[in-house]
């Protein structure tokens, strides 16, 4: 299996895919065991300021310590988990673990930055996300300003009333809201003014071919300008080259995240980024 190809194109099991039922049952059993045994781990990827290079946050990215295949990335089990009704305990663990870890670092006296946690559209619909976040912050003692949630545009295109209520409740807690993979989803811009959003995360697919692709440069420029006009911070994801970073800097993008800065790393390595 390709280790770091793009997302979405290497899931074993998509709904409707013709896989043998015994394989599905086997994977489902392993996943249930993983949930029971907490066989997940979070990796952290730094986000740095283009203005001064300082660390501004981490994105928490879940991995499964698979008994047969080693560390397995989320593209290979999040959708599968959703289809088997197993996403809720995984998502709950991720939220709790990210907050627990950040608070532990804070208690050690390390410099603090926020941690961003991803929530899929299904998770957002199925769970009382705001209530759960409040409970996790209370349980771990993490201050709300150190937590952000990343949502994709698909969350915002359905269930407008309920989504607005939930996002307002999250904002009221003092937790940040970021739109992930911006530009790849349903492209109504109306939600940018309707919902209380703090950050736009420019999808890797638009960053990838810059600065060579004039079209992608135009798209990235437009997203940054629009974001700033709406008082939103902009983050570019998947930044792999110095040329991409220089362009983003010139365009006034606020933050970058990508292999150029660092791949996602385990908690021990992330700890070193925070050491005073
Ligand atoms: P995402 O939130 O857009 O996360 C960015 C993905 O791009 C991560 O893949 C990261 O490792 C990868 N990446 C970062 N920098 C670069 C780069 O410079 N080049 C390239 N080619 N890739 C880069 P990962 O960790 O495999 O996660 C894939 C997706 O899985 C995430 O996309 C997110 O949507 C989802 N995901 C991750 N953790 C969770 C979670 O805890 N819950 C939920 N619901 N989804 C999660
Ligand atoms: Mg994300
Ligand atoms: Mg993306
Ligand atoms: Mg993303």
Image: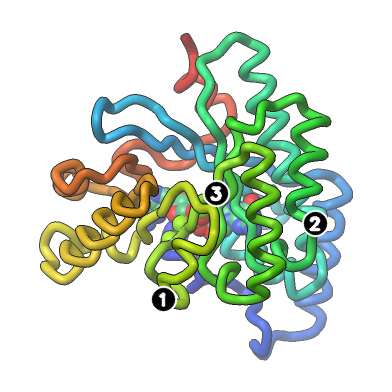
**Label 1 element class:** loop
- Residue 43, horizontal then vertical, whole percent: 57, 40
Q: In which quarter of the image is residue 20?
A: bottom right
Q: Mark 2 points at which residue?
A: 128
Vertical placement of residue 139 versus 39, above or below? above
Q: Are marks 2 and 3 in contact (CB under 8 Å)?
A: no
Among the two numbered marks 2 and 3 on one chain, the one whose residue lies closer to the N terminus: 2
The Cα atoms of the two marked residues, 1 and 3, are separated by 18 Å
Vertical placement of residue 261 versus 161, above or below? above
Among the two numbered marks 2 and 1 on one chain, the one whose residue lies closer to the N terminus: 2
Residue drawn 13% across the image and 57% down it: 211
Q: Name the residue under label 3.
A: 177
Residue drawn 41% across the image and 76% down it: 187
Quick check: is the Cβ at mark 3 less than 8 Å away from ligand 2?
no
- Residue 33, horizontal then vertical, whole percent: 86, 55
The Cα atoms of the two marked residues, 2 and 1, are separated by 26 Å
User: Is residue 5 toward the left or the right of residue 13 in the image?
Assistant: left
Residue drawn 38% across the image and 68% down it: 183
Q: Are marks 1 and 3 in contact (CB under 8 Å)?
A: no
Q: Name the residue under label 1.
A: 187
Vertical placement of residue 112 versus 175, above or below? above
The Cα atoms of the two marked residues, 2 and 3, are separated by 16 Å
Q: Is residue 82 visible?
A: yes
**Label 2 element class:** loop
Among the two numbered marks 1 and 3 on one chain, the one whose residue lies closer to the N terminus: 3
């Amino acid at each position: 299996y390709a280790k770091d190809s793009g997302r979405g194109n290497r899931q074993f099991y998509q709904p409707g895919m013709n896989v043998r039922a015994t394989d599905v049952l086997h994977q489902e059993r392993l996943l249930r065991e993983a949930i029971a045994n907490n066989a997940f781990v979070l990796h952290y990827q730094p986000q740095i300021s283009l203005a001064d290079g300082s660390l501004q946050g981490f994105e928490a990215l879940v991995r499964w310590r698979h008994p047969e295949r080693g560390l397995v990335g989320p593209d290979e089990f999040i959708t599968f988990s959703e289809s088997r009704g197993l996403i809720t305990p995984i998502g709950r663990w991720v939220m709790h673990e990210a907050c627990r870890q950040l608070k532990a670092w804070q208690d050690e006296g390390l410099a603090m930055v926020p941690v961003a946690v991803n929530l899929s559209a299904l998770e957002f619909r199925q769970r009382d996300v705001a209530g759960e976040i409040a409970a996790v912050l209370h349980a771990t003692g993490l201050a709300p300003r150190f937590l952000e949630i990343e949502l994709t545009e698909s969350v915002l295109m359905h269930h407008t009333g309920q989504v607005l209520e939930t996002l307002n409740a999250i904002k009221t807690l003092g937790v940040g809201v970021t739109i992930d993979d911006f530009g790849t989803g349903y492209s109504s811009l109306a939600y940018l003014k309707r919902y209380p959003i703090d950050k736009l995360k420019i999808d890797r697919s638009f960053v990838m071919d810059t600065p060579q692709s004039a079209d992608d440069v135009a798209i990235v420029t437009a997203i940054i300008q629009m974001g700033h006009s709406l008082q939103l911070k902009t983050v570019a994801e998947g930044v792999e080259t110095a040329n991409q970073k220089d362009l983003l800097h010139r365009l006034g993008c606020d933050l970058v995240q990508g292999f150029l800065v660092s791949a996602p790393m385990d908690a021990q390595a992330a700890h070193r980024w925070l050491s005073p």
